[in-house]
Image (cartoon, rainbow, N blue to C red):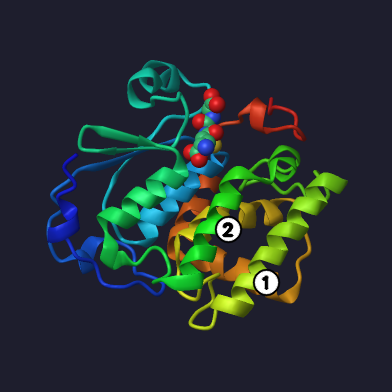
Amino acid sequence: MHFRLHATHRLPRLISAPLGPAHLGHALAMHLRLIIANKNYSSWSMRSWVLLRQAGIPFEEVMLPFDSPQWREHMPRLSPTGRVPVLWIDDEAVHDSLAIAETVAELFPDAALWPEQGPAKWHARAVSAEMHASFNALRGAMPMNISANLAGFGDTPASRADIARVVAIWELCRARFGGEGPFLFGRFSIADAMFAPVVTRLRTYGVALSPVAEAYARAVLELPAVAQWCTEARGETAFVAHDEPYRPAPG
Ligand SMILES: N[C@@H](CCC(=O)N[C@@H](CS)C(=O)NCC(=O)O)C(=O)O
């Protein structure tokens, strides 16, 4: 292992960070390359991309569209699991969105990507892990599809129960830990990156939210990195049938 950034590269603390590397103030010693898939569909990719971009950490983006010749050609070499995201740190591959988040937090401690310590940090870890491991009904019934308007689709008892749990998490975090900003733990953290694709799903499927959850969802959508991801997602034209249970293929 050769994580040289830890000692030599310090980032300022983030509230809602400006984009770009200007505030790094120095060249990075490591090359970060993030392998992702379609911005419209790939919710796991979105988490890692939003985290890096919102933290202002420079990285090279490699987008391999699902079901494409590029995916078939490059994925065997670029992803140990055949899935995205994968973060390459020089010639080391770190797969899985939660492992990527932990690794980035470790490499850039001054970005303060987790809350500082104590209960806020413990809860941020817990809800990020819960997001990572749960909500299968919501994922299945309401696949991420940023550019679509599918209001009313995907509303099942199981997806509704998942949404109720997500909203309960948001309300608890906002009430207990959100005093210093509009995010789950006040300032932007890994937990917000983990929930960002859920926020877009709730918009796509027209889900009505409580006032606290709605305010949080708006804050997430207004994050510069989330706004950029969504704009780029809306610019994509690929139609991936596997992610489109509700719409016929165009043409
Ligand atoms: N637990 C993984 C999930 C990764 C995942 O399922 N990625 C999807 C895209 S969002 C994927 O690569 N699917 C392609 C496939 O399964 O062939 C993570 O957190 O990164």
Residue 152, disc: none
Q: Taking 163 as reference, is 95 above or below it? A: above
Snapshot quadrant of residue 228: bottom left
Q: Does the beta carbon of the residue at mark 1 sit less than 8 Å from ligand 1?
A: no
Mark 1, residues whose alpha carbon is within 10 Å: few (<14), some, or many (≥20)? some
Residue 127, disc: 2
User: Is 251 or 132 nearer to us in this picture?
Assistant: 132
Residue 55 is situated, as x and y percent measured from the top left of the image, at: 34, 61
Q: Residue furthest front?
A: 118
Residue 100 appears anywhere in the view: yes
Of the residues shown, which amino acid type is indicated by label 1?
A: Glu
| Left or right of 71 on screen, residue 216 | right
Cα–Cα span, label 2 and label 1: 12 Å
The residue at which mark 1 appears reads as: 171
Tell me which residue sits at (38%, 63%) in the image: 113
Of the residues shown, which amino acid type is indicated by label 2?
A: Val
